[in-house]
Image (cartoon, grey):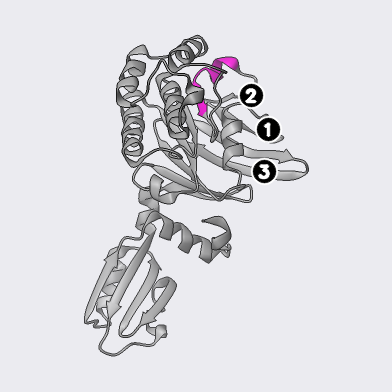
C-alpha cells in the first residue's frame, strides 16, 4: 500500500502539495487526475523517492521511500519525458535495469519485445517520441515492480498500442498484484482502466473514490412531460443541476437510482430514463457543487 499522510512539498515558497492524505491499495490501478501544475507529477516523484517531503510523509508498505534503496528496487517510475543513457539501445538498457531491479523478468521482457514493434538493437535516441515511450514502458514493466508509477502514460502512443498497454496493466494487477498509479489529465483514457480515481487541484486532494462508487452516486435523468412541471416539484430529490429543453427536463441527481426513478414516475412523465454519466461528467458535477472553477481544472 502507498499511503500519504499530511504530504507536503514546497518549491520556492509555493506548495506543490498541501497536506495531502490518501491511500492506494495493493493490486489496484489508480488514476490521479488534474490539470497541468496541479501536483500530480510531484506526487509521483515523491512516491518514487525522487523528492523528499517537506512535510508529512509518504510510505510504501509502511516504509518511508526517500533514501530507501531496497524499497526503490520495488518501484518503477516513468516520467512524462523518459530519460535514456546516451547512445543506448533497448538491449543495452535492459542490462542496466537487470542490475537495478532484482525482480527483472526476462520472460516478460522478451514477451514485451514481441508485443511492442521496436528494433531492440537500434539506438533509442533515433526513435520517434512514441517509440521511445514504448521502450521506456518495456523497461518499467519488465522490471516487474510492485509499484508502477506512470506520468501521462498514453502520450505519444497510437490507439492500438494504448489498448495493448491497458491489457498489460490489467494483467499485471490480476496476475502479479502490481499496483499502478497513472497521472493524467485525460479522464477518457482512465475510465475503463482504473479501480479508483483521485482528483488533485492546487496541491490539494479534492476527492478520491472507486469508479464504481462514483458511478453509484450520480445519475443523469431525462424525462419528457406533456406539461412542464415547476422546478419545485423536484425538491424531494438531491438535484445538482437541472436544464429544460422544450418538454424535456434533464437533471443530474445524487442518490439511489431506483428511488430517483420511482420519484420521477409519480410525476407521470410521458417518458423517463436514467443514463450513466461518464467519468468526466461525474467529476465536473461534483466540482461544480463544491464551488471549484471547473474550466481551470479539467481541460
Helix, strand or loop for disc 3? strand
Q: Which mark is residue 221?
A: none
Helix, strand or loop for disc 2? loop
Q: Quadrant of residue 153?
A: top left
Q: Nearer the viewer, residue 188 or 72?
A: 188
Q: Which mark is residue 66?
A: 2
Residue 247 in picture, x, y percent from top left? 30, 85
One can see residue 293 in this view: yes
Residue identified by numbered label 1: 53
Instruction: Give the residue at x 37% y 83%.
Output: 233
Q: Nearer the viewer, residue 127 or 32?
A: 127
Residue identified by numbered label 3: 16
Residue 139 in picture, x, y percent from top left? 44, 21
Q: Looking at the image, is 178 positioned above or below residue 6?
A: above
**Region rendered in magenta:** 69-77
Q: Looking at the image, is 225 positioned above or below residue 115?
A: below
Label whose residue precedes the other's in the sequence (3 or 1): 3
Q: Tell me if residue 96 is in the magenta stretch.
A: no
- Please indicate whether residue 237 sits to the left or right of residue 198 in the image: left
- Cβ atoms under marks 1 and 2 closer than 8 Å: yes
Amino acid at each position: 500500500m502507498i499511503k500519504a499522510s499530511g504530504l507536503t512539498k514546497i518549491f520556492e515558497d509555493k506548495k506543490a502539495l498541501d497536506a495531502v492524505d490518501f491511500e492506494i491499495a495493493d493490486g489496484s490501478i489508480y488514476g490521479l487526475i488534474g490539470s497541468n501544475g496541479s501536483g500530480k507529477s510531484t506526487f509521483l516523484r515523491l512516491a518514487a523517492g525522487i523528492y523528499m517531503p517537506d512535510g508529512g510523509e509518504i510510505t510504501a508498505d509502511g516504509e518511508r521511500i526517500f533514501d530507501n534503496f531496497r524499497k526503490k528496487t520495488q518501484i518503477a517510475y516513468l516520467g512524462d519525458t523518459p530519460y535514456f543513457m546516451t547512445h543506448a539501445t533497448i538491449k543495452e538498457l535492459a542490462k542496466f535495469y537487470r542490475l537495478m531491479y532484482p525482480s527483472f523478468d526476462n520472460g516478460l521482457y522478451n514477451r514485451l519485445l514481441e508485443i511492442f514493434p521496436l528494433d531492440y538493437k537500434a539506438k533509442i535516441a533515433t526513435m520517434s517520441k512514441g517509440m521511445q515511450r514504448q521502450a521506456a514502458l518495456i523497461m518499467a514493466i519488465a522490471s516487474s515492480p510492485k509499484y508502477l508509477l506512470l506520468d501521462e502514460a498514453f502520450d505519444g502512443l497510437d490507439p492500438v498500442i494504448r489498448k495493448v498497454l491497458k491489457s498489460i496493466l490489467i494483467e499485471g494487477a490480476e496476475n502479479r498484484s502490481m499496483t499502478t498509479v497513472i497521472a493524467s489529465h485525460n479522464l477518457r483514457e482512465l475510465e475503463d482502466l482504473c479501480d479508483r480515481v483521485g482528483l488533485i487541484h492546487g496541491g490539494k486532494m479534492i476527492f478520491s473514490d472507486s469508479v464504481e462508487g462514483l458511478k453509484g452516486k450520480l445519475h443523469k435523468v431525462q424525462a419528457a412531460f406533456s406539461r412542464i412541471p415547476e422546478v419545485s416539484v423536484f425538491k424531494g430529490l438531491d438535484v445538482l443541476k437541472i436544464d429544460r429543453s422544450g418538454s424535456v427536463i434533464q437533471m443530474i441527481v445524487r442518490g439511489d437510482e431506483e428511488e430517483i426513478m420511482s420519484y420521477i414516475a409519480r410525476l407521470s412523465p410521458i417518458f423517463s430514463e436514467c443514463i450513466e454519466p461518464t467519468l468526466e461528467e461525474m467529476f465536473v458535477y461534483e466540482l461544480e457543487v463544491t464551488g471549484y472553477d471547473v474550466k481551470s481544472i479539467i481541460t
